[in-house]
Amino acid sequence: MNSVLFICLIFITILALDAFGQTGDAEAGKSKSAVCAVCHGADGNSSNPVWPNLAGQHDQYLIKSMKDYRDGKRDDPQMNETFQSLSDQDIADLAAYYSSQKQN
């Protein structure tokens, strides 16, 4: 294989991985979910209709939503504050955990 083609394939692979975001660890997400569980339930199934269920949601949707709260693109004072200290990996882990849960 010619070296230019090989370098292009590596570059495209890196871009594709970045486009799909980080891979989360559901077990790590479970251990990070205590604050979320207060409103959204231990497994992401909220007992209060005011707070949405997180269980079973698509992981990329959850990642985007959490990053939008953290970065101030979605406005909810409680949620914005909750996500301020979370890294991209923390968010990916939480998304992996909640997306792996069954929605009631």
Image (cartoon, rainbow, N blue to C red):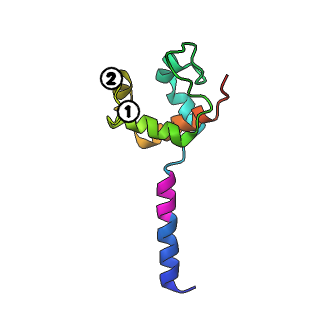
Foreground residue among 36 and 50 = 50
The x and y percentages for residue 46 are 57, 18
Residue 85 percent location from the top left of the image? 35, 33
Q: Amino acid at mark 1?
A: Tyr
Crowding at dot 1, Cα within 10 Å, few <14 / some 14-19 / many 20+, comes out as many
Residue 90 seen in the figure? no
Residue 89, placed above or below residue 8: above
Q: CA distance from mark 1 to mark 2?
A: 9 Å
* Residue 93 inside the magenta-drawn segment: no
Label whose residue precedes the other's in the sequence (1 or 2): 1
Residue farthest to the bottom? 2
* Residue at mark 2: 77
Q: Label 1: which residue? A: 69
Q: Is residue 88 above or below residue 79?
A: below
Classed neighbour count for the residue bearing mark 2: other residues with Cα under 10 Å, few (<14), some (14–19), many (≥20): few
Residue 94 shows in the view: yes
**Range of residues picked out in magenta:** 14-20
Q: Residue at x 50, y 19 (%)?
A: 51
